[in-house]
Image (tube, coloured by chain):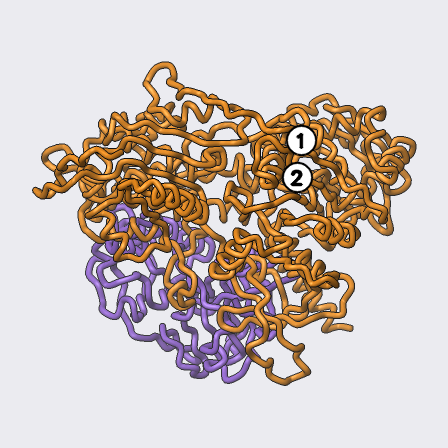
Amino acid sequence: MGEVKRKLSTGRGIWREGGLHTLYISPLKALAVDIARNLEIPVREMGLKVRLETRTGDTPASKRQRQRRDPPDILLTTPEQLALLLATADAPYLFSSLKRVVLDELHSLVTSKRGDLLSLGLARLSALAPQMTAIGLSATVAEPDDLRRFLMPQPIEGERLADLVLGQAGAQPHVQILDTDEHLPWAGHSARHALGEIYNLIKTHKTTLVFVNTRSQAEFLFQELWRANDDNLAIALHHGSLDVAQRRRVEHAMAGGKLRAVVCTSSLDLGVDWGDVDLVVNVGAPKGSSRLLQRIGRSNHRLDEPSQAVLVPANRFEVLECRAALDAVAENAQDTPPLRTGALDVLAQHILGRACGEPFFADDVYDEVRAAAPYVALARADFDAALDFVATGGYALKAYERFAKFRQGQDGRWRITHPRVAQAYRMNVGTIVEADMIKVRLVRSRTSGALIPRGGRLLGEVEEYFIETLTPGDTFVFAGEILKYETLVEDEVYVSRSNATDPKVPAYEGGKFPLSTYLAARVRSLLAQPEDWRALPDQVREWLEIQEWRSLLPGPRDLLVETFPRATKHYLVCYPFEGRLAHQTLGMLLTRRLERLRMKPLGFVANEYALAVWGLGDLAPRIERGELSLAKLFDEDMLGDDLEEWLAESALMKRTFRTCAIIAGLIARRFPGEEKSRRQLTISTDLVYDVLRKHQPDHLLLRAARADAATGLLDVRRLGEMLSRIKGRIVHKALDHVSPLAVPVLLEIGRETVYGEASDAILAEAADELIKEAMS
Amino acid sequence: MAVAGVSLHADPAGALYWPEHGLLAIADLHLEKGSSFAARGQLLPPYDTAATLERLTQLIALYAPRVLVALGDSFHDGGGPERLSGIDRDAIKALQRGREWIWITGNHDPDPSDGIGGSFHAELHIAPLTFRHLPTGAHGEVCGHLHPAARIAYRGRSVRRRCFAGDERRIVMPAFGTFTGGLNVREAVFCDLFGTLAFTAHMLGDDRLYTFPAKRCLAD
């Protein structure tokens, strides 16, 4: 690296000493900062004349400007910053001397739209610096060939794979499931029953990382641990909604060995080096074997010593999931999702960025883009549609030629029409679209008529769309407490403590991962094989045995459907094990069908493993008389017209569309703290969605949103795979009362959101209630 | 729905029909809003004008009114009429055929425009009602401008819809335009207009109106 830098043209008639030598890209700002710190030490000790710097969203603007004029040898940064650098006129100067790109934690990048953006950036880098080699690092990957393709510019025919270097396998980790002496809950995710046991584990280890799946679980567990903390152990909290300064303090204390435990979410999943962790505790379901392996890997960084981990299932189904994950870990079985097909909204963003850099020929960019593995099969028509979208909105009705954001010049090159286009691009770059968050503040309850006192303690943040579902007086769970919604003051929600034991409105659950398809299959086969139950705790084994006796346990590829009456209602419960998102979609579609068959469903609730639908009529006799065919009810054709009809009004679909509209640059991102009055000036994407659906259903943004619905909030693809798997394999069991297996999902009623779209039916019910109130 | 003793039929599409005069009123069409945004760099779909006119065509077919009153802000900006496509311009002309067409001027379109037919008025009195764009709170007023919308939450679900906001003395009509948003009736401006919260929101449903006292509606 000691070589003399060549003089390079900056593209503006100025020659400077050469640009970057090495680019390091990580999914997390914290990781880039951490790696820089670890690199600086040997560089200093060896007296190397190498300059290394980080560049993230937190880097001051002046430093970022200077980096473009006078780049370091090694730059450590994120995919978004790479996109920004590529979209400047400096890009050829900065990158043409590049020798190496290192992509850390590559598996976590490639499965999202961020990976799409990164792949396009990488393709651009290959064009600017053909001599450059890309290196990907990953400790958990199911299909290494996917990552090997991702790293190389792909040819039009065939494929090109990067070399594979396998690290030395570490010692087999020691993982066990906590064998609790307490009563194992039927449902819920708090693991409250195991608190004492978790605390004792912390006490008997040097440093423990306690992983949970959601922010609210982290809050809850942290508070409960401190309640039990008689020894005053240094226990800290780390999750994505916390203030950055707070997170940095925890990270420093951790690195300095000052903490006994950190309760954290996936904010600490990735490979930041956390000093001397000797135990990892995973509370709740692991959700996927790769995720679990990644977390376990946080303990004991020496390869020759085994990592130590304890899994703490929070309920009975989670015991099964933990057992399945444990077996997967023993086989080192990975279940990272396959490589994506590149999203069209990300492509649109990239094309605009490309035009902000320098004018281009469409043919060149089309070829360049197809070198990126996720876009290798991109049709020219789709590329042209994205180009047309960026230029004039991509409408069949050509009305906006004169308002084009960029257009083709006489020389055939496309160039932006105004500098403000580049400015807007820079404000909007990236693929992470956060839901609008709103602060939750704890106040004293309002005594009748009195004003609410201001300025209580801040509890955290929740998504705005959750708060929209509340009426003053509604109770819900947040930060481990049952809270009463008081009022909305500017951009904060005021809540008070409630004495209620039963929250009226389902809990807030942000940031859940669905159960991986791979683990789901393992759980189903575990259920189907009683000889394997020996490894399960007594309480769980008994639960399954009673289920077998009262109802039945489905075969590994079957779908069990139970019907039974309870209180004044009749229930239909099925067990697809495909994760909550796919179950929600199934629930929406099933209730639509049942409604059409005049079976009058009233509602449904889904969890990771099961779906329960209820109504006033008993379905069992109708099924037996052949009036209701379960095979027809669960037929794949529900993904046709029924799905289309639901998508027209689905709030989840509209949220998906909004994300695509922001990434593609049709709608500007909102920034925290932005005035509400300014927000009202922006147009609602729901209106745009409705209009496009009606007038141009094949518009690029609708296609992008449909592609997202296959895997995102609606998980349609997984539902489709399930429906095709269970064809001819539905087993119906009519029961007199609730089965043991159905208890957990029924307990979710009132905790999980009862789904149903916000529609006229709600208005009619609310209006009826009002009339009843008035008449009584 | 009765305003100043006059019985009006409120259509869930967001229009008012006065049978005695064969008069149909709609407010805040905001035609050419998409192209207005496009001119400022945000390329919203150019289909809003056609979509709005299509819904208006259905209403006119249903009521066959002798008089149509557009209560102002019929175009999103002064340049709107010029940007109209030939097809949309013809659609407006076809709708105007055989009836009196009154453009009430609004704050977005304060000046009369050429080439879009109809007659232009600041307001229209037909005793005991007055049709105008900006609300003044006067007795017998039918107005627009505010784009009222109401929100109801029930059993963990929230529904927000455009609505008529009124009491027995005056009424504010919902915005009819495809790209028009709504202003929550719990914003102070409505309370100021009616003098109290004792007014009613008639929310637009798929095929009927749903009526709630403003007190029962939620802020956003």
- Residue A700 placement (x, y as % from top left): 38, 37
In what element is the residue under mark 1? helix
Asked if the residue at tag 2 contacts the one at tag 1, i.e. Cβ–Cβ closer than 8 Å, the answer is yes
Q: Is residue A431 visible?
A: no
The residue to which callout 1 is attached is: A519
Q: Colour of chain A?
A: orange
Q: Residues within 10 Å of mark 1 (few under 14, many from 20)?
A: many
Amino acid type, residue under disc 1 in the picture: Leu
Identify the chain drawn in purple.
B
The residue to which callout 2 is attached is: A286
Q: Nearer the viewer, mark 1 or mark 2?
A: 2
- Residue B45 placement (x, y as % from top left): 34, 47
The chain to which mark 2 is attached is A
Can you say which quadrant of the picture contains the N terminus of chain B?
Answer: bottom right
Q: Is residue A381 visible?
A: yes
- Residue A457 placement (x, y as % from top left): 59, 72
The chain to which mark 1 is attached is A
Q: Nearer the viewer, residue A218 or A116?
A: A218
Q: In the rendered view, would you say A689 is above or below B118?
A: above
In what element is the residue under mark 2? loop
Q: CA distance from mark 1 to mark 2?
A: 9 Å
Which residue is outermost to the top?
Answer: A158
Amino acid type, residue under disc 2 in the picture: Pro
Q: Residues within 10 Å of mark 2 (few under 14, many from 20)?
A: many
